[in-house]
Image: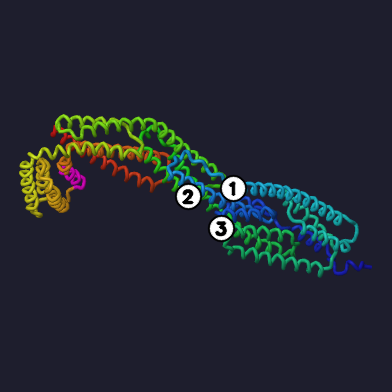
Amino acid sequence: MMDTHDTNLPEKAEELEEDKKAAEVSEPALTETPAEEATQEEKPVETAPKLSKEEILAKLKEISAEVENAGKQAIDGLKQAFYKLHNAEQEAAKKLFIENGGAAENFVPIADAVEEEFKNIMSVIKEKRGALSAEQEQQKELNLQIKLSIIEELKELVESPDDANKSYTEFKKLQQQWNEVKLIPQAKVNELWKNYQLYVEKFYDLLKLNNEFREYDFKKNLEIKTHLCEAAEKLADEQDVVSAFHQLQKLHQEFRDTGPVAKELRDEVWNRFKAASTAVNRRHQQHFESLKEVEQHNLDQKTVICEIIEAIDYSELTNFAGWDNKTQEIIALQNKWKTIGFAPQKMNVKIFERFRKACDEFFRKKGEFFKSLKEGMNVNLDKKRALCEKAEALKDSTDWKATADELTKLQKEWKTIGPVAKKYSDAIWKRFISACDYFFEQKGKATSSQRSVEVENLNKKKDIIEKLAAIDENMDTDEATQLVRELMKEWNNIGHVPFKEKDRLYKQYHGQVDKLFAHFNISAASKKLNNFKSNINSIQEGSPQALYREREKLVRAADAMRNELQTYENNLGFLTTSSKKGNSLLTELNRKVEKLKADIELVKEKIKVIDDSIRSAE
């Protein structure tokens, strides 16, 4: 007689074999990155919403009380926001310190009690997170032992001689326990799953359930896995790629914990779920690949900035202008740095430390330079004060020739003295030149015998203006240009005119010259030089020493432009040999270099004109 438990069971060996094979078609081991590891790859959030430092502390205190419910991203975001505010306060304090007359290198950051409290809270959070992590690892090990125990019990059910139908309730209980135990060490996931699935399948092979019972399990599992497939397919439209990836990991866990479906549907259901997973994983991978590309580009830009600062030749920075120009470049590079986003995580801190070290080295050397010059500038100030006293003692003299020679010597001696502190520079120069100008003005008034010559010169210059006005605009360009230059040369050779007529005559002359220059397209540089030549006589009218002052001003301007040119050429050479990332910067540097060269040549020509005028006067 047939046992009642065998009613409606498969009666053929072939059917039992098919059941066994069906149990063996388990889901393939998943290779996607586990949620625990994926979290570690996430990039920090940019910053927390705009909060005050006190509000950030309040939030961190809340997190400290419930560390287990706070994510690393939230903590990092609050930390970044806090130090952004803290650094801004320190920069503002430093700026105020400098504006009040303090030196940047003497600034001492203000002690911040809020920062100390922040550090204490962060220390507590770190300690609690460490303890929580250790506790989680212990829980994983405990879960591993529980699941190993479940597998052993399944093994006993499979190997038990008792009727498998009677063990079905115990089997479902073990399945429920298995699903309730979640995280285990990642290295054991696939191996443990394979062992579990092996004994589940063996149990199903041995289980002599009726077909209706078996089909019911398959039907319920199919409903669950179909729902999981639909949920995975919807994740392809999730805007937050990272969130979609983590949601997928949970779906994988549910799919894995769900029992098998009918044999003929197993491949179809798995392939559908796998295809949806592949789409989400591909988006996740592309997202981080694009981030890596952007971050690598940011790293390249930041590396170029570091190399530019590190390549500074400090031996060439020997004066105020050089250091000031170089400081402006460093500040521009610092501002550029702030506009560049994150570098790759493993390099972000290192490249910033390199940048900060290079900047700190520059400002340290700058501080040493100005400190070493301070004593020398005090000596220079004493020397210039002595020259001022001598010039002031001579300014009322009526011995025109001897006094003029003596003041000229004093002016030449002034040029040999080095710089003084900026806060004294303008005042001491004004004091010295005022004494010199006073003497030469008095001397000019005493030499009124030149007035008749000035009237004659006035008539000559009026005649030149009339000749310029009479030039035919239809004349050949080369012929007209030659005629204009001859008349300008003749104008420059004519001496002083009466002072009250000087400005009016000057405007008339330059009005005609500018008109002809514009019409015949004479070069701007040539125009500037010719205008300067015509100005020489005007400069001399105030006093002969005005030429020396003008020459000194031009020499200082030329030196400053040469220093600036050297700086640009150094950076230009560095970029063309060491960087492929600065095309726009390279173009701008080339433009500035060419303009500086042209300006330097024009200044040199002006100095030559003054030297010729001085030699003629002597």
- Rendering coords of residue 278 (x, y %): 61, 58
Q: Is residue 379 left or right of residue 186?
A: left
Q: Position of residue 273 (x, y in %)?
A: 66, 62
Sequence-earlier tag: 3 or 1: 3
Task: Give the overall secondary structure of the magenta segment.
Answer: helix
Measured Cα–Cα span from mark 2 to mark 3: 20 Å
Tell me the tag on residue 49: 3
> Depth check: 321 or 418 in front?
418
Could you tell me residue 266's position as x and y percent?
Answer: 71, 63
Q: Is residue 349 visible?
A: yes
**Residue at the disc numbered 1:** 115
Q: Circle 2 is placed at which residue position?
A: 340
Q: Earlier in the sequence, mark 1 or mark 2?
A: 1
Nearer-the-camera pick, 558 or 297: 558
The residue carrying pointer 2 sits among few (fewer than 14), some (14 to 19) or many (20 or more) residues within 10 Å by Cα, namely: some
Precedes in sequence: disc 2 or disc 3: 3
- Asked if residue 522 lies left or right of residue 8, the reply is left
Q: In the image shown, does 126 or 590 lie closer to the viewer?
A: 126
Please name the amino acid that badge 1 sits on: Glu
| Quadrant into which the C terminus falls | top left
Estimate the spatial distance between the alpha carbons at disc 3 and disc 1, rounded to whole Å: 19 Å
Q: Residues within 10 Å of mark 1 (few under 14, many from 20)?
A: some
Taking 492 as reference, is 128 left or right? right
Residue 255's disc is none
Q: Which residues are magenta?
A: 523-534
Q: Position of residue 330 (x, y in %)?
A: 42, 42
Query: Does the segment drawn in magenta span residue 532?
Result: yes
